[in-house]
């Protein structure tokens, strides 16, 4: 049973619009969350993180929102650019743990 | 970019043969990880290491073994490869931190095909 879920395998968005990628988790011990971006034939690269003491973290065009009661987080990309087209993985860990559990990923396509 | 390399980058092998994948880091990070990436499953942890000669199993460790004799190298071995082990394998490293920068850095991946 997956502890970290990304229920949308794919998402298409027009350039300039907002992209919203969602992630749900089941383990209430998770308190640190990350988003990774992956291009084909490359390793994942870290994008943004959030700890459970916050409900929002922003870095340029990227914002992550955390709703602890719903065990849900989302990544907002505004404005979306064609270079954002990639697979996005959500990951979670417990108490700044050294191991992470990854979701299955969402493939984002930003159309020019 | 974190100094992490994987070798080989591509390998095709036959069922029943042993295979060893190498991960090398120049960051002197304590933690090293092996993941496999498969469609619909994302990244699944195979084994990880928290120091030289200190390793532990992950979620999908059956059929795999690891060794870490030096800080910079983490080897993943398939003793007898099976077709179900066809996958893309990623190595990751992480420093010892409890702060906000608690992320893993990934290598470029090794695509393994078992015929």
Image (tube, coloured by chain):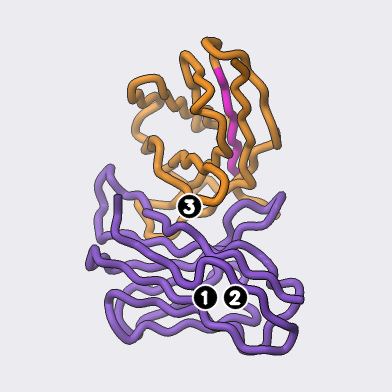
Q: Residue at x 28, y 42 (%)?
A: B100
Taking the magenta stretch, the answer to whether it contains residue B74 is no
Which label number is shown at residue B61? 2
Marks 2 and 1 close (CB-CB < 8 Å): yes
For chain B, the rendered hue is purple
**Chain letter tied to orange:** A
Within 10 Å of disc 1 (Cα), the crowding (few <14, some 14-19, many 20+) is some
Q: Chain of mark 1?
A: B
Q: Disc 2 and disc 3: Cα gap in Å?
A: 21 Å
Which label number is shown at residue B57? 1
Seen in the picture, residue B115 relative to B88 is either above or below; the reply is below
User: Are tags 2 and 3 found on a single chain?
Assistant: no
Q: Residue at x 55, y 70 (%)?
A: B46
Q: Which residue is mark 3?
A: A43
Give the mark toward the camera: 2 or 3: 3
Quadrant position of the N terminus of chain A in the picture? bottom right
Left or right of B1 on screen, residue B56: right
Quadrant position of the C terminus of chain A in the picture? top right
x then y, percent, for residue A23: 59, 35
Q: Disc 2 and disc 1: Cα gap in Å?
A: 6 Å
Magenta-tinted stretch: A19-25
Q: Residue at x 59, y 81 (%)?
A: B64
């Amino acid at each position: 049973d997956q502890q970290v879920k990304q229920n949308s395998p794919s998402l298409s968005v027009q350039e300039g619009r907002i992209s919203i990628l969602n992630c749900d988790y089941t383990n209430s011990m998770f308190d640190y969350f990350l988003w990774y971006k992956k291009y084909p034939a490359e390793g994942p690269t870290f994008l943004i993180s959030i700890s459970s003491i916050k409900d929002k973290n922003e870095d340029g065009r990227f914002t992550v929102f955390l709703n602890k009661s719903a065990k849900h987080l989302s990544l907002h990309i505004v404005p979306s650019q064609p270079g954002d087209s990639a697979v996005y993985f959500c990951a979670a860990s417990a108490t700044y743990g050294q191991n992470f559990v990854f979701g299955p990923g969402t493939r984002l396509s930003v159309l020019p | 970019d974190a100094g992490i390399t994987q070798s080989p980058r591509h390998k095709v092998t036959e069922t029943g043969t042993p295979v060893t994948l190498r991960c090398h880091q120049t960051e002197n990070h304590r933690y090293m990880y092996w993941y496999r990436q498969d469609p619909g499953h994302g990244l699944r942890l195979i084994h990880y290491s928290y120091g030289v000669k200190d390793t532990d199993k992950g979620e999908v460790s059956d059929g795999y073994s690891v060794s870490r004799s030096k800080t910079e190298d983490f080897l993943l071995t398939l003793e007898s490869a099976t077709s179900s082990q066809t996958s893309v394998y990623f190595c990751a490293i992480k420093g010892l931190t409890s702060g906000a920068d608690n992320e893993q850095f990934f290598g470029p991946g090794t695509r393994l095909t078992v015929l």
